[in-house]
Image (spheres, rainbow, N blue to C red):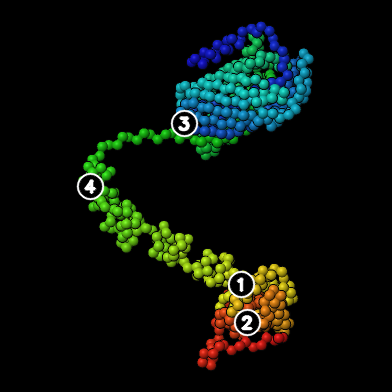
Amino acid sequence: MKKTLLVTAALAASLAPAAARAQNVSGFNADRFNPSERGSEWFALDTLDLRGDARPAVGVVAEYAASPFTLKNADGSRGTAIVSSQAFLHAGGSLVLFDRARFALNIPFGIVDSGNSGTTTSGTAYAAPTNLAAGDARASLDVRLVGEYASPFTLAVGGSFFVPTGDPRQYTGDGVSHGLVRLQAAGEAGVFAYAINIGYQERAQQNYVADAAYGSGLIYGLALGLRVADRHLLVGPEIYGEANTSQSDSFFKNGSTPLEAILGLHYTIGTDWRVGAGAGPGITRDIGSPAFRGMLSFEWTPAYKPPPPPAPPPAPVADRDGDGIPDSVDACPDKPGVKTDDPKTNGCPPDRDGDGIPDAEDACPDKPGVKTDDPKTNGCPPDRDGDGIPDAEDACPDKPGVKTDDPKTNGCPPDRDGDGIIDSEDACPDAPGPRTDDPKTNGCPKAAVVNGMIKISEQVKFATGSAKILKDSDELLGAVADIFLKHTEIAKVRIEGHTDNVGKPAANKQLSQARADSVKAWLVKHGIDKKRMSTQGFGQEKPIDDNATDKGRANNRRVEFHIEDGGTPPAPAGAAPATGGAAPAPAPATGGGGAAPPPPPAPGH
């Protein structure tokens, strides 16, 4: 009530006759729209939702005004629009504290500011705005006095302090700090909602703008609306304005009494988000009252969550051994124990590993585990894959594996070459290689010694219909050369060329021979002794896939490297390669344990 008396005293003082009329000013804040704090469901008024403790709300209000500052001609008609279009983006937030008080900030950012220069009938010149500028920032505090949100009547007292961050030359600020005090009321009855405010705004300057009083004044507003759509939508009109008190002859007088009306709506999406839209005219054409004002808003307003009711005091429970288990259900009421699901052991010791399973039923009484229906595993650490290695130590808890000393591989399936691909999925389990989608090459390097062959993970690429090796295959053949250099025990390798069945058999055989020779020549050029290699072209004679499909023909166009002497046993020259590119098993030895018969000489050599 003290604050209310102060407001009344200030209002009475300001209504006293002024000693002398101040001069016209050339710059001021033409935007008289003062948006409500974030969290309100009105644009200018306030629903006074002051519930919660440390409950935030943040959002933006976009606001456009048409002709908020227009000069008047001598006959009273509308003259030059000094500010013809002005728009702000009001970014702000609020924080409700102690279920009663709300602290809020609002910062207007100018996004449109245009107009025309002009002169009043008394000769005062006003320049048009030339640049965008921020408006005056605002900090506010409101305190709920009586009532609750959405009750028939809620009353709050508060005020705002404006910092001169705006630019008077662009008509976005007053150039001095100023403030206001206000009383606000709001309430609901069924689907009807209302809001009222009245207050006093104190501006330090007491001047005239375009021959109309500008300065301190009474502020007021009224909103009426309907709550529909399960209380998600509030829609209704708002009327708000000012009455200048800086001069005794200006109170509710023409030129100094801006008054506006808007029809707005706010819709709550879910529980935490809210959008709004509104528009309306200036009822008077006084300074700051535009011909039209439109607004859009978007806010994050978390729903109020009431605190849980206090828990009732616990009823006294008899517990002689102090183990937290009431004597009425404690199988051992005089000995501290642990809680179990078995009435015969509930509240009784022992449980050495503390897993809640009595030692008498615990298959692993010294290792905390989980309860199972199997007496052999009940109370033991989890082992999802059943490989005997607890999940806590198992690097692959969902794949049965083997025990190792390496925590990274303990419990994982075997991986002899250590390339991260288990042997059962690794096409080259003894040669580390990358993972691929092809089970025939998965885990294989570009070249590796596998089953009597130097197995390559991709095809040697030639120019179409030619024996010219493309540069794309240099890295692949380099890997084959590395095999020769690292495996000096390999004394002889047969390089085979193969084609599909497209074309004449004789031409295909000649092409396959030329391609095998090209590969040999490439390897010789890169340091491999030619005596360690022979070549043979088979043309279309040894397909490994169906020549009736494009994919099959592509697979049949290939180069193979068969080890004839040294390394793993070689494959015979006349045998077709095994599925997946690996060489077939060598022909059985003859002559009582002798070696397999040598391959026939390659034609053309």
Which of 366 and 161 lies nearest the eye of the viewer? Answer: 366
Secondary structure of the residue carrying tag 2 is strand
Q: Are marks 1 and 3 in contact (CB under 8 Å)?
A: no
Residue 576 image offset from top left, x and y in percent: 60, 82
Q: Earlier in the sequence, mark 2 or mark 4?
A: 4
Please count the marks in the image.
Answer: 4
**Which dot, 1 or 3, sits closer to the camera?**
1
Q: Quadrant of the C terminus?
A: bottom right
Q: Give the distance between the C-alpha atoms of the residues marked 1 and 4, in whole angstroms.
A: 71 Å
Q: Nearer the viewer, residue 137 or 484?
A: 484
Q: Earlier in the sequence, mark 2 or mark 3?
A: 3
- Residues at circles 4 and 3 in contact by the CB criterion of under 8 Å: no
Residue 68 place in picture, x, y as percent: 69, 24
Q: Nearer the viewer, residue 194 or 338?
A: 338
* Residue corresponding to mark 1: 447
The residue singled out by tag 3 in the image is 53
Q: Residue furthest bottom?
A: 591
Q: CA distance from mark 1 to mark 3?
A: 69 Å
Q: Amino acid at mark 2?
A: Lys
Gap in Å between the C-alphas at discs 2 and 3? 85 Å
Going from N to C along the chain, the mark reached first, 1 or 4, is 4
Disc 4, SS = loop
| Nearer mark to the viewer, of 2 and 4 | 2
- Residues at marks 4 and 3, CA–CA distance in whole angstroms: 46 Å
